[in-house]
């Protein structure tokens, strides 16, 4: 029997507006086919440290499968996961052919953001920076599902950036040196991405280029140095773009949706949400921990001091 096999790979590195995104296009993930007798087995190969959500569709002629399609699957780190077998539907009609398409992104589509989780501010002890864009204020670029709950902190280039919550490094793209308010920089934002234990992903974007301070697969604790701020990618001024998201399926592809988060700081620890136009200070001299959030009281403004934000539009 002659098997005619065709395939097409579609990656899920879709831009949402003019925003930075983790470099999933460089991540070692792919779909392959393996011959199993007269059948073809579709396998997702994840050779990296991130859980990957993949959305797969099949089309073709005279084919059948042992599972329904389209399919949404979470592929664990460092795993080759069989997704299903494809075989001839009617042997009397001769061979079969099929085409598979897929999109994918970091994280788990079934991730439930821990409502008790709080995040330390992503800069070092004693530093204060203004929030230039955050949910609830005027949004100049965070006006889509992917970036709705992102927070921008205006800060000089070279400011040390620390992990806001513990997790595993799944992306450390630091190969770019330029940035500006020009569409040619859309895909050139240096980014460190960290997956949390609940399957959500934090991204720290527009970082400075050069040698990284973290490696793929490295587990980092809240407060640990992960990079330095910069002005790479599509941006109108030096700042840190911080976002926590989870994958979702939208219009037949894997997209991302940001989730609302709360920070904590001060002694005793206070829980608060970031507000545009205010400055926040990293004060963690107490033993407050992001793993002990149930003891952190809630506040709408917390450490906000009321300082006016910088005048550039942080993208």
Image (cartoon, rainbow, N blue to C red):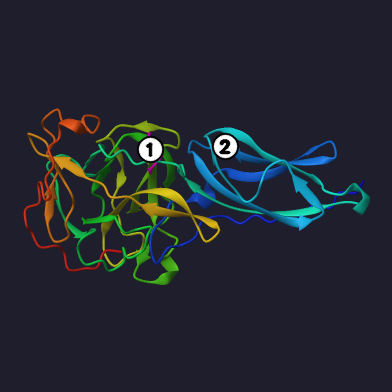
N-terminal label among 2 and 1: 2
Say the numbered circle drawn on residue 281.
none
In the picture shown, does residue 198 fall above or below 30? above
Confirm whether the magenta stretch covers residue 142: no
Whether residue 211 is visible to the viewer of this picture, yes or no, is no
Q: Which residues are magenta?
A: 196-200
Q: Which label number is shown at residue 214?
A: 1
Residue 183 in the image, given as x and y percentages of width and height: 42, 71
Q: Residue at x 37, y 37 (%)?
A: 196
Above/below status of 93 relative to 216: below
Are dots 2 and 1 in contact, CB under 8 Å? no
Q: CA distance from mark 2 to mark 1?
A: 18 Å
Report the mark closest to the observer, 2 or 1.
Answer: 2
Rate crowding at label 1 as few (under 14), some (14 to 19) or many (20 or more) other CA atoms within 10 Å.
some
Q: Decide: few, some or many residues near mark 2? Use Cα within 10 Å; few <14, some 14-19, many ≥20.
A: some
In percent of width and height, residue 137 lies at 19, 63
Q: Position of residue 238 (x, y in %)?
A: 26, 60
Query: In the rendering, at what x and y percent does residue 215 appear?
Result: 42, 37
Asked if 21 appears above or below 165 in the picture, the reply is: below
The quarter of the picture where the C terminus appears is bottom left
Residue sitting nearer the eye, 236 or 269: 269
Q: Main secondary structure of the magenta part?
A: loop
SS type, badge 2 = loop
- 87 sits to left or right of 252: right
Instruction: List the single residue furthest toward the bottom.
Output: 182
Residue that badge 2 annotates: 47
Residue at position x 12%, y 42% in the image: 126
Q: Nearer the viewer, residue 303 or 240?
A: 303
Q: Quadrant of residue 266?
A: top left
In which quadrant of the rendered view does residue 176 lie? Answer: bottom left
For label 1, the SS is: loop
């Amino acid at each position: 029997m002659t098997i005619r096999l065709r395939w097409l790979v579609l990656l899920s590195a879709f831009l949402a507006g003019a925003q930075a995104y983790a470099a999933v296009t460089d991540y070692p993930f792919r779909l392959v086919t393996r011959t199993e007798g007269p059948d073809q087995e579709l396998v997702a190969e994840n050779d990296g440290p991130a859980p990957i959500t993949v959305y797969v569709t099949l089309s073709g002629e005279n084919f059948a499968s042992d599972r329904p399609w389209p399919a949404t699957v979470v592929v664990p780190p460092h795993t080759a996961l069989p997704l299903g077998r494809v075989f001839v539907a009617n042997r009397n009609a001769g061979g079969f052919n099929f085409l598979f398409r897929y999109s994918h992104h970091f994280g788990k589509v079934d991730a439930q953001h821990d409502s008790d989780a709080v995040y330390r501010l992503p800069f070092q002890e004693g530093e204060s920076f203004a929030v230039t864009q955050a949910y609830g204020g005027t949004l100049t670029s965070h006006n889509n599902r992917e970036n709705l709950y992102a927070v921008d902190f205006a800060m000089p280039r070279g400011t040390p950036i620390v992990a806001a919550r513990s997790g595993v490094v799944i992306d450390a793209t630091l190969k770019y040196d330029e940035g500006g308010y020009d569409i040619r920089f859309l895909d050139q934002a240096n980014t460190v991405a960290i997956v949390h234990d609940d399957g959500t992903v934090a991204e720290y974007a527009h970082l400075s280029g050069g040698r990284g301070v973290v490696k793929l697969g490295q587990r980092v604790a809240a407060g640990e140095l992960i990079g330095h701020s910069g002005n790479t990618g599509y941006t109108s001024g030096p700042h840190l773009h911080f976002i926590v998201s989870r994958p979702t399926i939208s219009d037949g592809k894997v997209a991302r949706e940001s989730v609302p988060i709360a920070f904590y700081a001060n002694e005793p620890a206070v829980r608060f949400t970031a507000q545009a136009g205010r400055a926040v200070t990293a004060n963690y001299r107490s033993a407050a921990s992001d793993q002990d959030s149930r003891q952190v009281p809630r506040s709408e403004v917390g450490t906000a001091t009321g300082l006016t934000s910088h005048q550039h539009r942080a993208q």
